[in-house]
Image (tube, grey):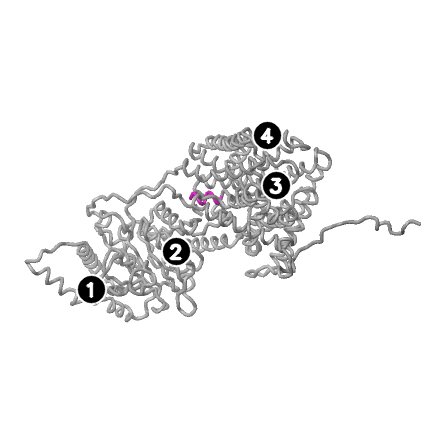
Amino acid sequence: MPPQNVSQDTIICYAPLMITTQGIWQGDNPLNYSLPLFLLQLILVVVTTRILVFLLKPFRQPRVISEILGGVILGPSVMGRSRVFANVVFPLRSVTVLETMANLGLLYFLFLVGVEMDIAVIRRTGRKAIFIAVAGMILPFLIGISFSFLLHQRTQFVKQGTFILFLGVALSVTAFPVLARVLAELKLINTEIGRIAMSSALVNDMCAWILLALAIALAENEKVNLATLWVVLSSAGFIVFCVFVVRPMISWVIRKTPEGETVSDFYIGMILTGVMISGFITDAIGTHSVFGAFIFGLVIPNGPLGVTLIEKLEDFVSGILLPLFFAISGLKTSIGAIDGVDTWGILALVIILACAGKVAGTLLVALLYQIPFYDGVALGLLMNTKGLVEMIVLNVGKDSKVLDDKSFAIMVVVALVMTAIITPAVTAFYKPARRFAPYKRRSILKTKSDSDLRTLVCIHTPRNVTTIINLLEASNPTNKSPLSVYALHLVELTGRASAMLIVHNSRKSGRPAANRTQAQSDHIINAFENFEQQTEYVSVQPVTAISPYSTMHEDICSVAEDKRVAFIILPFHKQQTVDGGMEATNPAYRVINQNVLANSPCSVGILVDRGFGGTTRVAGNQIAHHIAVVFIGGPDDREALAFAWRMSSHPGNTLTVMRFIAGQQQQSGSSSAQNDPGVLTVVTDSDREKQKDDEFINKFKTMIANEKSIVYNETFVNNGEETMAAIRSVDEVHDLFIVGRGQGMSPLTAGLTDWSECPELGAIGDLLASSDFASSVSVLVIQHYVGSDLDDDDDDDFVAASPDSPRNHNQPRTPKTNQRPPPSPRGSHMYDS
């Protein structure tokens, strides 16, 4: 009788699933277990990527280059050539785990891209951007078709049409996030060419997603049949379901959440689960899982929910998991597969023709729209930027056996080279002409009494908005001398494109913000627009600048020159704490202030905010400020007094001017030398400055003879200690001190700089801004524009500080020329929101 259990005749051998190790002390090798091996691989990828980002930063290369290169270095092209390294660190058994985690990171990254993307932006791009995007895709697509015939014979069992579609999409796509980063690095993001490029890239991205979905549907089937049709119809049905079912459900969740509160963790968890469900559905119906995640993110309404999702996911996904995907692309790339001179020749030909095709197509449409030739070529070069979408196309093609090792390696190298050459090529080829005409009124002193005072206010966060607006309100805009304000929101440039969207989209549609940066920008713009509406004789123009902190001062100076402003107001890098002390907010703000002081094209003021005017904006007819000016001497102090004088013209303000004069000990030595006929006296720069101070003060005293709201005091002091004591003795009724920065040494401030915490404020400014001074007094430290000698010789316009003061307009004036060297051609116009 045969045995009852015949399965005993079959022996199945399998490796047990080893996830975590018992430890090296038990004799286990951690690299034989999946979790420790994955963690080591992740560490290697992240560290290699970060090192390459640091090394390539001087060449201003986008981060995607470092991430792909990191994978190439760790892969079979470089370190993988060592069999020991390949077998120990990246064995074949670990590829499944690594790719699974990489695709999970990609899934959530594409979800975030969908959350941040605003379809309304694409609808508003206009025909110009659409035509440029389409023209920039057609020629590279045709080149991809030609290229496919050269490579197709090496790829077996693949339909020619599918191969054409994959290569065409890979060559014709433009990566919007990478392009936005390149534009910001080149200081072109806020120019006309930058806005056109971003609009076209958005359109191009959407077209690429449609083509990608079609390519995947075709790749899953060897020929177009009923199954392919079902894939397309199912994908369309999924989109319809998301738009008409999922979006209303999420809108209901948002409406249910009380205003000002965050969405509950339960709903956040459900939405994050929905990302995986969407990926599962689209993968099951034959489209890639990232397509479902992207559509799911796209239907989430802009607002606090999007902000919360981005804050919870962005850093981990884009900083840790996404580099895994690019590294996987590099690990799959074997440069050695590109063998033979003919193959390298094909590679060079593809790079040149694809780049030239994109430039030619873009240039043709640009010329039809009367865009200058060089602008059109630069636009075409920018549209060659490659990135995430192309790498997804190539990876799907590799996994679907549409691309073999050689084709895949060639296309990865094409993407790397085309993206890497963009920044150097545009920098070398495109020199944007500066439209800055020389202008003379670069300071408050030089601004005429019957013209507008152009002021640029810089804002990092909404915290300083109220105080700055109160300061502008108190500066007495009148019909005769109105106030032109340019509110510059400074945003740090990061590796993502989300911040760039606030520049591209002026946010005038009334829609909620998609992220925190956008929300802050909206708050700032709305505050200044309300200020403009509620205050007479004030015009406000919101501006946004996105830069790395290291070059942010270039944007500030560029805007100042472009808008021909006379005065820049910067927020101090410290803020007041609850107990009245001062703590640093961001050390980078201090470096920005120092760089602006050194390179500014006009006068600069640093505002130490201690709640000037209270926490709410003060109405014009309710202003009652007590302002004090410390006047020791020099151009900075004259500029400070000029601005304070302008503020004193407001009927609600009072002004106290404290002039400190060298005491008898200081004057006795100099006067005896001057009275001695045997001593040769030389008129020095300090003597000239003293003479200008005396003339300015005499005119000031004459003009305010009948002004009851202005008090002028003179105090004799001999050293810095006496000066400090005199300032401390002032009553605490004042809520704003205005002082000059006071460059250079003065006997009246001797010794004050020995314990200086912030030398950029000068001796007096540093004292007033210190924590041990009055906690309720804001301080404005002003530096006069440091221009040519000709610019500084004439202070006849000092009455501009008091717009309503009488002025002899028939007085002849000698024209002056601005001899300041022109700014660097890298600068650009900022985007006016």
Judging depth in this view, the residue of 588 and 704 nearest the camera is 588
Residue 257, image quadrant: bottom right
Element type at marker 4?
A: helix
> What amino acid type is highlighted by mark number 3?
Asn
Q: Is residue 520 magenta?
A: no
First of labels 1, 2 by sequence position: 2
Image position of 417 with respect to 546: above or below: above
Instruction: State how far apart marks 1 and 2 are (Cα).
Output: 39 Å
Q: Are marks 2 and 4 in contact (CB under 8 Å)?
A: no
First of labels 1, 4 by sequence position: 4
Task: Report the residue marked by disc 1.
Answer: 661
Task: Report the residue marked by disc 3.
Answer: 395
> What amino acid type is highlighted by mark number 4?
Ile
Element type at marker 3?
A: helix
First of labels 3, 2 by sequence position: 3
Q: Nearer the viewer, mark 3 or mark 2?
A: 3
Specify start and end residues of the magenta stretch as a single range: 180-187
> What amino acid type is highlighted by mark number 1?
Ile
First of labels 3, 1 by sequence position: 3
Tell me which residue sits at (25%, 55%) in the image: 635
Instruction: State how far apart marks 1 and 4 are (Cα).
Output: 83 Å
Q: Nearer the viewer, mark 3 or mark 1?
A: 3
Q: Are marks 3 and 1 in contact (CB under 8 Å)?
A: no
- The reply to whether residue 185 is visible in this rendering is yes
* Residue 674 coordinates in the image, percent (x, y): 10, 59
Instruction: State how far apart marks 3 and 2 are (Cα).
Output: 58 Å
Instruction: State how far apart marks 4 and 3 are (Cα).
Output: 19 Å
Q: Are marks 1 and 2 in contact (CB under 8 Å)?
A: no
Instruction: State how far apart marks 3 and 1 are (Cα).
Output: 76 Å
Q: Which mark is residue 535?
A: 2
Tell me which residue sits at (61%, 41%) in the image: 395
Image position of 708 with respect to 188: above or below: below
